[in-house]
Each structure stands twice: as structure tokens, then as C-alpha cells.
């Protein structure tokens, strides 16, 4: 697919101001079933899964024994076990990671990425739009998920926060994908481009695999309040996560930086402070929210309050502060 050069990209305004849908190609979907599914997966994620009821979800990191991030996922409790949803490109790695520790437990992992189709419906009017067309109301609580029918098609609808303050992940069978997309169009819902979704994701600071280089720690990705439980039982990588919590901070954190002008930062461009490297650009876009070029980077904390000395690829840059929260924070199950 050729890159889109329109600014803002097609559908961006609708994602931010009204509602739009988009195709999410290649998302990772792993199904875990069996009597030990919840107990087993709970030992490998920072999320607290034991108290989840069917229809509830948690966001969590999967980490290796050293505490380095393998994946960031939304983990949904179903009647049969768990549905693990991740950004594209993680299916083989996460499946292998879980199977590596699977010995005798009653749990089966199925990579369903090729048999499920993922879409997003997002924007301030998205909940009302879905409610008007389904007998089942979309979930009001962040990360809640329901089974519903849209245009006569069976779907799962999950409330998400990485495509704006109000967004929903809509998944169906891959066999129904074309029919669902045609239905969105017939119902008059505008289609947002992949570039629009990517722009909003970057503006919302939601990390994709490209933003999680080797040896990234969970607390460096700025999702601690939502994705890490400090009250659950033992899990792989917990020693590192707990040690960082005891110290009180990490030395780096995911940040959105804006650069002067309209030239897109190159992926891999160095972020420097007074000539010293403090980060690397991992995702970039032309952002209407910041009024120009912007990128994600895991930035050293000493650069977070930097002024004119911060450069990206030699171009003056600044850290974009977080906007005030527009949704209630996730409450950890106890």
C-alpha cells in the first residue's frame, strides 16, 4: 500500500470529531482455552486476570524472565477462556513464548490471527452510532467487551483508548470481513485510512512493536497505571517490575516529541540533548494535534523538560505534554 501524503490523512477529522471506521490489517489474536487457561496465562502477564469475569478485560505486558517486554496486549475473559489481542506482528512470538512454558496444564493456544478480521470504530459519536444499530449496547467501561450483531454479522466489540478517547475494536470472522466493511459504508459511516489511525495512535502515545525495542522495560512505556498490577501473584518478570517500583522510577519513558516544520522525522533518527543521545524515533506522523511533525521515542528523563537544546535528527524539537485525561482510569480488580 502506497503511503498517504494527504494532511490530515483521510478520516482523521472524523476519528477526532465525529465517527469513522477503519480496517486493522494483521492484528494478533490468540485464543487460550481449557480449564487452566486463566491461571496459566496469569503467570506470564502483568495484568491481574484471576478475578476477571466473562465480558471483562485487562491490559497487560508479557515479559521474559529478565523483565523485558515481549508484548503489550488486551486480554479478554470469555466463557471458554481468554482472547489475547495485540498489534500486528506479534502472533508467532507471543504464541511461542507461551508454549515454551506449557507442559501439562489444561490449556490450548490457537493463533486465530488469520481467521479473525479486526476493525476500529472510533470518534466522539462512535458509541451512539453503534448503539443505534445493535440490540447490544457497546461497552461503556474501558476494556469491556460484548458479543453483538452488526448488519446481521456476529462480532465482538471491545472498548479501547488507543484510537482516541472513545473507540471500539470490532472483530468478526475473516469470512465476514468484506460484508461487514460494505455494511459500514451502506450505513454511511466514513472510512478512515490506515494513515489516520496511525496518526491518532501516535498522538495517543500507544506503543506498537516498533516502539518497543529489545530490552524495553514495562514501566518505560507509560502504561503502568493501566497495564501493571502490583497486588497479584507471581508472574514471569515480576522481580524486575517490582524492583523498579521499589526504586520509584525508570530512567526512560515513552514520549511524544514535536519537531519544527512539516518534515516527517525519519524512523531511527537520533534524539539529542545538548549533543548527547537521549532517544531514537520509532514511529512518526504529521500531527494535526501538535500542528506539525511528531514522533514517539523512549526518552531519557533528563530530556523530558528540555527546551531549545532538544533536537531530532538535527531539527529543533520539544516534548509534547500529556493532555488532561478524558476517560476514567482503569480500576484494578482486587
Image (cartoon, rainbow, N blue to C red):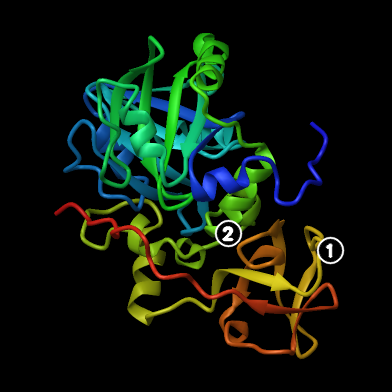
In the displayed structure, 71 sits above or below 332; it is above
Lower position in the chain sequence, tag 2 or tag 1? 2
Residue at position x 51%, y 27% in the image = 118
Q: Which type of secondary structure does the marked residue at label 1 adopt?
A: loop
Left or right: residue 271 compared with residue 116: right
Left or right: residue 210 compared with residue 128: right
Disc 2 packing (10 Å; few <14; some 14–19; many ≥20): many
Q: Is residue 191 visible?
A: yes
Q: x, y percentage for residue 91?
A: 55, 32
Residue, disc 1: 263
- Which quadrant, please, contains the C terminus? bottom left
- Mark drawn on residue 213: none
Left or right: residue 239 compared with residue 53: right
- Which quadrant, please, contains the N terminus? top right
Q: x, y percentage for residue 286?
A: 73, 58
Q: Is residue 163 visible?
A: no
Q: Number of marks in the image?
A: 2
Q: Which type of secondary structure does the marked residue at label 2 adopt?
A: helix
Report how far apart the C-alphas of labels 2 and 1 lie in the structure. 17 Å
In the displayed structure, 4 sits above or below 259; it is above
Residue at position x 46%, y 44% in the image = 123
Disc 1 packing (10 Å; few <14; some 14–19; many ≥20): few
Residue at position x 50%, y 16% in the image = 183
Q: x, y percentage for residue 246?
A: 33, 78
| Residue 135 vs residue 226, the one in the foreground | 135
Residue, disc 2: 203
Question: Which residue in the rendered view is the most extreme toward the left?
Answer: 334
- Circles 2 and 1, Cβ within 8 Å, touching? The answer is no
| Residue 41 vs residue 227, the one in the foreground | 227
Left or right: residue 14 compared with residue 150: right
Amino acid at each position: 500500500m502506497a503511503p498517504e501524503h494527504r494532511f490530515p490523512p483521510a478520516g482523521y477529522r472524523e476519528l477526532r470529531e465525529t465517527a469513522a471506521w477503519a480496517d486493522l490489517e494483521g492484528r494478533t489474536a490468540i485464543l487460550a482455552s481449557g480449564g487452566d487457561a486463566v491461571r496459566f496465562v496469569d503467570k506470564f502477564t502483568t495484568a491481574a486476570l484471576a478475578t476477571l469475569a466473562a465480558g471483562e478485560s485487562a491490559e497487560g505486558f508479557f515479559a521474559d524472565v529478565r523483565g523485558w517486554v515481549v508484548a503489550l496486549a488486551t486480554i479478554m475473559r470469555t466463557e471458554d477462556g481468554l482472547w489475547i489481542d495485540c498489534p500486528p506482528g506479534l502472533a508467532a512470538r507471543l504464541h511461542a513464548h507461551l508454549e515454551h512454558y506449557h507442559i501439562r496444564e489444561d490449556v490450548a493456544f490457537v493463533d486465530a490471527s488469520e481467521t479473525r478480521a479486526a476493525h476500529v470504530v472510533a470518534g466522539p459519536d462512535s458509541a451512539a452510532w453503534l448503539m443505534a444499530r445493535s440490540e447490544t449496547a457497546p461497552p461503556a467501561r474501558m476494556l469491556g467487551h460484548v458479543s453483538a450483531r452488526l448488519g446481521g454479522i456476529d462480532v465482538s466489540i471491545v472498548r479501547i483508548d488507543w484510537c482516541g478517547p472513545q473507540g471500539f475494536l470490532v472483530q468478526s470472522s475473516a469470512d465476514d470481513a468484506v460484508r461487514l466493511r460494505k455494511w459500514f459504508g451502506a450505513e454511511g459511516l466514513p472510512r478512515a485510512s490506515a494513515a489516520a489511525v496511525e496518526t491518532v495512535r501516535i498522538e495517543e502515545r500507544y506503543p506498537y512493536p516498533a516502539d518497543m525495542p529489545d530490552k524495553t522495560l514495562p514501566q518505560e512505556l507509560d502504561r503502568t497505571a493501566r497495564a501493571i498490577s502490583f497486588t497479584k501473584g507471581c508472574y514471569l518478570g515480576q522481580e524486575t517490575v517490582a524492583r523498579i517500583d521499589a526504586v520509584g522510577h525508570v530512567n526512560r519513558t515513552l514520549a511524544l516529541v514535536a519537531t519544527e516544520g512539516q518534515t516527517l522525522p525519519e524512523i531511527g533518527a537520533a534524539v539529542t540533548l545538548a549533543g548527547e543521545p537521549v532517544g531514537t524515533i520509532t514511529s512518526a506522523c504529521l500531527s494535526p494535534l501538535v500542528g506539525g511533525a511528531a514522533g514517539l521515542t523512549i526518552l531519557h528523563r533528563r530530556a523530558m523538560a528540555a527546551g531549545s537544546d532538544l533536537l531530532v535528527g538535527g531539527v529543533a524539537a520539544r516534548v509534547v505534554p500529556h493532555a488532561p485525561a478524558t476517560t476514567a482510569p482503569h480500576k484494578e480488580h482486587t
